[in-house]
Image (tube, rainbow, N blue to C red):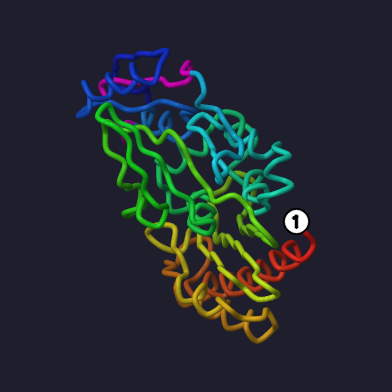
Amino acid sequence: MLPAAFEYASPGTLDEALALLDQHADDGKVLAGGQSLIPLLKLRLASPAFLVDINRIPDLDVLEERDGALVIGALVRHKTAERSSLLANRYAVLAEAAPQVADPLVRNRGTLAGSLAHADPSGDWGSVMLAVDAEFVLRSRSGSRTVKARDFFSGPFSTLLQPNEILTEIRIPARRGPTGGAYLKLERKVGDFATVGVAIQLQMDDGKVGTAGIALTAVGPQNIKATEAEAALKGQTLNDKVIKEAGQLAAKAAEPRADLRGSEAYKRNVVRIFTERGLKRAYERARGGG
């Protein structure tokens, strides 16, 4: 199928883009990488009358530490995250997730912010952002607001992002002290939707868990933050018993549905195993400085 007819604009500034979105709030869409939007257009699952292409806008491709946070701009592509030495050296969970997103063709054009705005419950970045306690800067013509990742996702393919807003920045607390992360993903083949994914982030404090982030991919109507498992880890010395309990609590938090990729019981078990493996991997990285 071919997309329905639409008007197209490629503004050179963010203010111009926001003005266009304000003008076409009821029938406009933002185009960044297009790896989620274009298939929807071709299948006519989405038929916006106006596309606002933001690729010409400067300074939206920033990936740097600034003002106590890792800042990821709206035009940072998956491949940039995959190749970033900053992420490889300091943000292991992001570095590990990036090469597991879809396939190389998608990673070349797709953006982290676009993936988050699409809010596919099988999307990898949603879980990563929940685990690292990210926040998102949403800009409109009337100003900006900051939303925590845990509040951003409201359901399958649904977020708090308004039609006249652009997700301009992702902000992640800058790494301080012994920190480690991991992302584990099960898929049938490269480029397939995830069967299960688990994101882990640990901040250690004097040999014990200061804070823990655990989030789940593809086992619910949206990416899931395993809050009970996180709480059970806080203040604990990581040993086999503590890790096992966290794995069980993470599996309990999952809301999987049986499909061609596996039964509910199978997916819960993968969540448990991946949580245990991820915690051990993240802990080793925290101890080793990575």
Percent coordinates x, y for residue 75 in the rendering: 51, 29
Q: Main secondary structure of the magenta part?
A: loop
Q: Is residue 55 magenta?
A: yes
In front here: 212 or 25? 212
Circle 1 — which element? loop
**If the image is split into quadrants, where does the C terminus sit?**
bottom right
Quickly name the residue at label 1: 290
Q: Which residue is painted at 37% across and 59% down in the image?
A: 221
Amino acid carrying label 1: it is Gly
Q: Does the magenta stretch include residue 74?
A: no
Q: In the rendered view, does 190 fall on the left or right side of 228? A: right
Q: How many marks?
A: 1
Q: In the rendered view, does 51 fall on the left or right side of 101? A: left
Q: Is residue 16 above or below residue 196?
A: above
Percent coordinates x, y for residue 22 in the rendering: 23, 24
| Residue most extreme to the right | 288
**If the image is split into quadrants, where does the N terminus sit?**
top left
In front here: 140 or 178? 178
Range covered by the magenta-colored residues: 44-57
Q: In this view, does 101 lie above or below 132?
A: above
